[in-house]
Amino acid sequence: MSQTAFTAAPLIGRNEELARLTGVLERARGGAPGAVLLAGDAGVGKTRLLDEVAGQATRAGTTVVTGHCVDLGDVGLPYLPFTEILGVLAADERFTAVLAAHPAVDRLLGAGPDAAGGPDGRLRLFEDVAGLLADLAAVAPLLLVLEDLHWADQSSRDLLRFLLGRGVLHRPGGGVPGRRLALLASYRADDLHRRHPLRPLLAELVRLPGVERLELRPLPDPAVALLVRALEDRPLPDAVVHGIVARAEGNAFYAQELLAAADAGPLCAGEAGAPARTADGVPSGLADLLLIRVEQLSETAQQVLRTAAVAGRRVEHALLREAAGLPEDTLEAALREAVGHQLLLARDDGTYAFRHALTREAVYADLLPGERSRLHGGYARLLAARGRAPETAAERAHHARESHDLPEALAARLEAADHARRLGAPAEELRHLEAVLDLWPSVPASARPAGRELDRITLTLRASAAAAHAGEVHRAVSLTRAALAGVGEDTDDELAARVRYTLAGNLLTVDSLSAAFRYSSEALAMIPAEPPSRTWVWAAATHAAAARQVGEEETALRIGRQALRVAEELGMTAAQADLLISLANTEAGGRRSPQGRARLRQARDLARTARNAPVELRALFGLAMGAFEAGDLAECLPVVAEGLDRARRAGLLSSAYPLEMRYVQLVTLVTLGRWDECLRVAAEVAPALPAAGGAFATSPALLVELARGDESAAGRARALLRGPFDWMGTLVAGIVLTDSAVRRGDAAEAMERMREAVAALGDGTTRRPGVTVRLAALCLAAVADRAVEPRAAGGADEDPGRWVRAAEELVQAARATAEQDAEGGVQGPEGLAWLARAEAEWATVVSGPDPAAWERAVAAFGYGDVYEQARCRLRRARALLASDRPAEAAQELRPARETAARLGAAPLLEEIDTLIRRSRPGAGGDGPGAPPLTARERDVLGLLARGRSNRQIGEELFISGKTASVHVSNILAKLGAASRTEAVAVAYRRGLIAPEPASG
């Protein structure tokens, strides 16, 4: 076989995939950026396809840069593929001016100051990288290729999520030209086990506009045969080709390796089925074939390959020379041999890379245990001898651990954790700290790094903080519990108390309220109030917050006021702010009262003075919730914007209060009827949410989806109930599932969903969550309809009193909750509006539809909830029609219909239009008083006449199917038609549309 066969291998059987990728590139060159996630099993041909695309892109004038992710076991090198990409771009003179304007380059390449790192620099880093890529694409069309995404570190995954979700794929708008940028990322689909960290990210990315997923499936047998014959420059016997095809199973790399091994022995078909796998994941049959090729090299070249395999997929020439311990000329000869046999590739940057990751894995797996340990130790010493650069700490930790040098592995892991924290990579910091904790008992105390707070308990608390910053709140709880388990009799009381109140704070974050109160009680009991101490103040502050959450208001007030006096004496400004927040939430009137909000503003200012971002964010969240609960919706949104901006600058967007503020923002947008804005914001922020526990932040968008007729919203609501408990997600799920059942007229299911939600959100006693009044009012709509059915029909139910008793249970629950919710407070405008609706439904059950009761409900929702006010107007119109007051009913239906149409609430619009048609039988819509059709409605009407569905109408007019549905409902109402067919008939009679001429 010729030495150039592999490099000359043609691309076979991938025409469709190639056309799809080149289409993305062509659109990108035209200013429509796009991304493709290329999935496929190891060796199926992803790299070959990407090479072909990159070649075509280069010939078309596109700048192509590639970043590789590297497998270093459980060690992650933050931002490695992006660092590689920026290194290549930095060497291109065309981009010198652009790169100089973006400090992200120096930071990621290790030339920037450490001050650029830290938690508050992470978002700036992401935004700067996005800005850099946009500016580079303005100079020349740009193609980014990310290979082996399944090995990507957490920070690289987060940066990719940001770039695709909020960065480079978004059109600038405002007449600014589109970005000439495309991104192709490959990953091994067969490596993605159920808990692989890339899996949730992929699920998010494929939902983004501009992101596609392309699966590279095994080649069909005829294509493999063509490939095999094309690889060889001499004729091959059919038996050889058939044997390779049978064993390759559609995998192009397998086929190449089988052909390459042909000279080592006969090739014959193997048994059917997938190859067996060794412990390290390399197919055993393929590993044997790969090693046959390796064994064809000289012993020296094999030694160099084994040494290179320990370094990873790639290795610097100088580092390999030192690790191999060979003279330069001997090393070069061995490398030339390995490159000539297509086992290694020589890179322009002075590194060598295995041509395929499976080759490296097979060579590494074949090492003897002692040989593997020795080589890892050599790399660890060589890297350390170069200087303990922080960017090499993760590599040094990996090699030290694999060589069983546990003290060095521990020290390097700590360095790597510090480096990750400076880079603003909390997920990597957490992984390194967890490795430190794993190593800790295996390293003698005398060999551990010395320093302040370098004990197991304190390190565990640091790991829990990193977990919280990374959005892994339940992991933060687990780590703090582990710290508590390590507390013994010899542990300092202050540290033991700190562990307990930290655990209590983390438990509050995950809504484990009773446990939080228990641990905060224990913490406070461990530290005497006299003499005053900082530890006692923080323990008291945590206890005050926990006491309020479990209904112990008197305890919260007593401890909170006492601790506030001590904090003032000690000059603990941040603690003062934290205590003021708890008191504002607990004192009469709570956070929605003017006094409560004044306290919260004072707390915000104090926390800002103390530069304590977490406490400041807690104050801003309280201010936002207070404004919402008071019905001051216009004030709520600016406070949320302030809080999110502060969180962004502090690098804390994934922490608890910013996520809850995002939730409040979307709830407020829903309430105000700014539904399109709500959906847009939810779509924009979703990619940046923590993979675990962040879904609740955008869950209010489900309320819009359901109201617009998307019944699949119920399925997504159920997904919120899976996994660890989340209070806000459970609340939204309860509302959506209850309302969905009500819309279907299933009163029994609606009540069941309500009971489940109340039980999940309550405290297991007679105290009900505040949402009970809303859920009860929703259920009463379906129950009231069932209760009046027999009366209206003159018939009898199996149990005439069943629905009356159910309605009584619901209205009593609504009244009780309005008087005192789970936090002991009286409901605000929102709760009182739902109570008014519940009373109106109850009046229907008792004595029939009552227009006066519904008038009170309409007025109550006037505080700002436009959709629910429209729903109440519809119910009042029905009551008015039942009272033979059609003119007043029409007055209610007109604004209700305008609201439903503006919101795109198609189901509500359909109900309103149905009632309008029923209220004026025989009136038709073709009289002189009928409202005129708009130009867009005439377009829709013309397509209706051609039998088009809503989806087809949307496609032809470049609008959504939901918008088309609203236009159709408008047309039916204006024409007084009960169906699409009748609307077309009326339109023909009125001459609004003309019959199409007969063909032929």
Image (cartoon, rainbow, N blue to C red):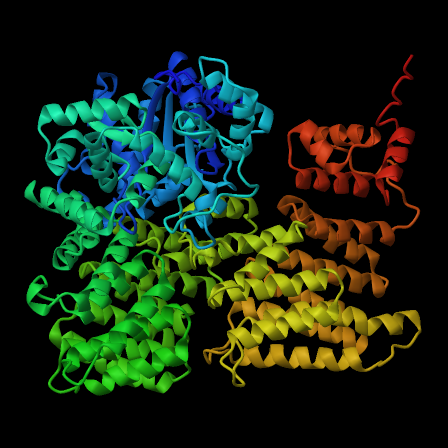
Residue under the point 84% across and 30% down: 945
Residue visible at 22% across and 36% down?
Answer: 308
In this view, the residue in front, 639 or 618, is 618
Q: Position of residue 909 (x, y in %)?
A: 72, 49
Where residue 479 appears, as percent x and y from the top left, is: 30, 68
Residue occupying image coordinates x 37% and y 55%: 639
* Residue 906 in the image: above or below residue 129: below
Q: Relative to 518, does residue 655 appear above or below in the rendering? A: above
What residue sits 46% from the left and 22% below the top?
25
In the figure, residue 498 lies in which quadrant? Answer: bottom left
Give the camera-side residue of 463 and 777.
463
Whole-percent x and y of residue 51?
A: 40, 23
- Quarter of the image holding residue 257? top left
Rendered position, 820 above or below 747: below
Q: Tell me if I can see residue 526 in this picture.
A: yes
Q: Is residue 750 left or right of residue 32?
A: right
Q: Quadrant of the N terminus?
A: top left
Quadrant of the drawing holding the C terminus: top right
Query: Where does residue 11 sit, x and y in percent of width and height?
Result: 48, 20
- State the residue lying farthest toward the front: 266
- Can residue 685 be seen? no
